[in-house]
Image (spheres, coloured by chain):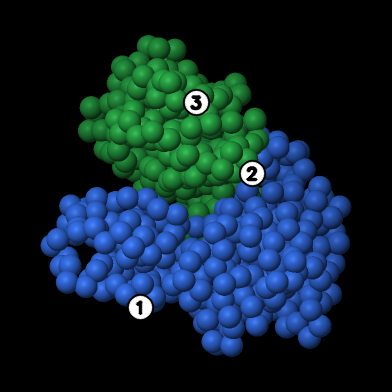
Chain colours: A green, B blue
Amino acid sequence: MKVAFQGVKGAYSEEAARKHFKDGCEPSGYAYSEQVFETVASGVSEYGILPVENSIAGAVAVNLDLLLKEDVFVVAECYLPIRHCLLAHKGVSLEEVKQVFSHPVALAQCRDFLTRRLIKAVPEYDTAGSAKLIAERHIPGEAAIASKGCAEAYGLNVLEENIQTVKDNITRFFIFVRGSKAPKGQTMQKTSLVFGARHKPGSLLDCLKRFADHGINLTRLESRPVPENPFEYVFFVDLVGGLEDKGVQAAIAELAEDAHRVKVLGSYPVAPR
Amino acid sequence: MKVAFQGVKGAYSEEAARKHFKDGCEPSGYAYSEQVFETVASGVSEYGILPVENSIAGAVAVNLDLLLKEDVFVVAECYLPIRHCLLAHKGVSLEEVKQVFSHPVALAQCRDFLTRRLIKAVPEYDTAGSAKLIAERHIPGEAAIASKGCAEAYGLNVLEENIQTVKDNITRFFIFVRGSKAPKGQTMQKTSLVFGARHKPGSLLDCLKRFADHGINLTRLESRPVPENPFEYVFFVDLVGGLEDKGVQAAIAELAEDAHRVKVLGSYPVAPR
């Protein structure tokens, strides 16, 4: 079973795929999130997995924007604890590390650790990509911030584990298939959708009331800009209830009267944290 | 009049400061947003200016999170059109450019341009910082994506102007002073505040109803995570109405009954786009 993720070997997304599919999958890494959607759309990969939210950094905006555009159906969510590690070549001590490469979000989450040790932070595209870079460059004084799995993947040493400032750091992923409908037999306990509120006073409130009217609890509300119309927004909503629930169906139908577009992203089981 | 911004000479934030203060200011750049707040808090700088939102990329999360924590009052908003330029040393032609440095958001916004020309994108902390880097390194085939002002600031040449995919690209800035109160004589037409909704069904809706009850229009609603409590959120709201308006005051007082914390970030005149 092929699962596409964004990043290289050892990425947190790959770890999330293995956690969700219990090793019964073959994860393939792609450079861009767009390519993850393409490979799912073409049928080359059965599933795509992408991070949508981190408990400290917030929404992964690029992936939300793509979910709005692309023709996929979210069939699962997955939570992965993020434990950033400092990785370097074997034989390099913590005192020798002068600069560290990683994704800007990971660097920011570990800033206290780096500042205390006067280590320079250098931005890179991925955490796992930084580990790969360090492994290939072999320059003294250089290290990467990435997952423990990356140490193994690239033959590096873990100098220090769990170095982020806020220890309880969790990323939430969406797992999706191609098409806009739920596959047969899909378990549906939570539903994710997007809507665009009209440009008039109180219209967001009108939209949200549609859910409250049916006793539906929202667990998440995230706004994203509409690039073509500066300072207009769409709202990403997660709600408790499956797409087959009568109340959810009624709320979505009514929402379509207030909102100027509604797109259901998927409906899936509640994942354990 | 000293105005602190994040970044180096030529940054879009510096341009925004000059636009807002009509050249009647002395902008100073700092490496981190945290330092902008520090210099305002200590009185070294009278004003701080930071981007809070871009019409394509969305919220500038790090700055929203700091506004929630720090003791400042927002006295103005400012909109700046963003026109990314490709900058290189004089004599370098577009065909010779092999890799380009910039902030990941700027790189993403110009991805179509870069992909078409097979130019490699390399992430850096700032747009202006990338222009500075290119100017100092002087390596053939390297360019930066930054503002036109950076060309002048660092003696570089503009190879191509306005290279982003979506041409109408606007960043919104907040300008703030120290303390939690409005300065005397402050013009107040819009108000920004943050609240934390309680963890029960419909509580966000209850909070938003407080504004609707007083006929107050929200122009923005942005959620941000509470790092200490994974998957709990605070909401950043911009509303039409000054802090001295009776309706706004009443709504905020009532909101305090539903929300588990409320913080007014500031109240300011409506800026032209």
Q: Quadrant of the N terminus of chain A?
A: top left
Residue A44 shows in the view: yes
- Identify the residue at horizontal 58%, vertical 80% (top origin): B26
Residue B227: percent from the left, percent from the top? 66, 40
Q: Amino acid at mark 1?
A: Glu
> SS class of the residue under badge 1?
helix
Q: Residue A243 location in percent, x, y?
A: 51, 32
- Of badges 3 and 1, the one in the foreground is 3
Q: CA distance from mark 3 to mark 1?
A: 43 Å
What amino acid is labelled 2 in the image?
Answer: Pro
Chain hosting mark 3: A
Image height of B163 relative to B153, above or below:
above
Label 3 in the same subunit as label 1: no
User: Which of the numbered marks, if any, corresponds to residue A93?
Assistant: 3
Left or right of A110, for residue B15 = left
Amino acid identity at mark 3? Ser
3D distance between C-alphas at marks 2 and 3 = 35 Å
Q: Nearer the viewer, residue B60 or B133?
A: B133
Determine the residue positioned at 30% across, 38% down.
Answer: A31
Q: Relative to the observer, which residue lies in front, A259 or A33?
A: A33
Residue placed under numbered mark 1 in the picture? B152
Front tag of 2 and 3: 3
Badge 2 is on which residue? Answer: B225
SS for callout 3: loop
